[in-house]
Amino acid sequence: MKDRIFKAMASLISCLLLTSIFTSVAYGAQYIYFEAGSVSPAIEVENRLSYGIFNNSIDAWNSTNTPVAITQVPGSGHGYLIDGQFSDDWYGLYTSLSRQYVFWGRTKKFKIELNRNNLVNESDTFRKSVLVHELGHAFCLGDNPSSGNSSIMNYTRDRNYLTWPAGDDIAGVNAAY
């Protein structure tokens, strides 16, 4: 009798474990979690950009059905956005500057850099797509290089068209917060 109960419990636990694993994998395929996202979906950022894309970019996130709230603030002590001339081939770069637990955990302060060398000949629409993508990292979204989905985090998105968070992006932010 004890053997039968033990086998039944072992089978039940195995089924639950496998269901949990496969459900997580299927759900995780829609967006990629980024562990260096902000501690809170309400962030304060300093705008040091020479481009006029800041307000439209934060509006793209603030108008989503998520808890995201981006506020522009002056001075240091906050996350900040800056552009500069870098010899690398990237358009934008998100960097965590301060973590919850010294070396790990979510971010308390970050910087986003836009590479003027690669953006100089691009439109404001293209630049906005880059900034909205980098802000996605602040909300726990990882790069989504080959999902085939319409996602601001997708490498192959049309940066001259897609300038707002899409369904997978919104689902990812809502799952993170």
Image (cartoon, rainbow, N blue to C red):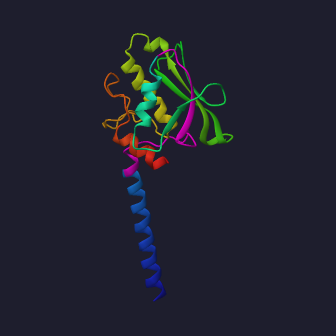
The residue under the point 65% across, 25% down is: 75
Residue 88 image position (x, y, % from top left)? 51, 16
**Magenta stretch: residue 42 in it?**
yes
Give the magenta range.
27-51
Residue 13: % across, % down: 45, 70
Q: Residue at x 46, y 35 (%)?
A: 136
Q: Is the residue 7 above or below the residue 57 in the image?
A: below
Q: Is residue 50 above or below residue 154?
A: above
Query: Which is nearer the eye, 166 or 103?
Result: 166
Q: On the rendered structure, is 135 left or right of 163?
A: right
Q: Can residue 164 be seen here?
A: yes
User: Nearest the camera: 42 or 142?
Assistant: 42
Indicate whether 161 appears above or below 106: above
Quarter where residue 59 is shown:
top left
Left or right: 74 in relation to 33: right
Dominant secondary-structure state across the stretch colored magenta: loop
Q: Residue 121 lies in what quarter of the image? A: top left
Quadrant housing residue 35: top right
Q: Could one spot residue 133 in this view of the protein?
A: no
**Number of callouts in the render?**
0
Give the x, y percent position of residue 94: 53, 29
Find residue 161 and report its horizontal and vertical position in percent.
Answer: 31, 25
Quarter of the figure with the N terminus: bottom left
Q: Does the magenta stretch include residue 177?
A: no
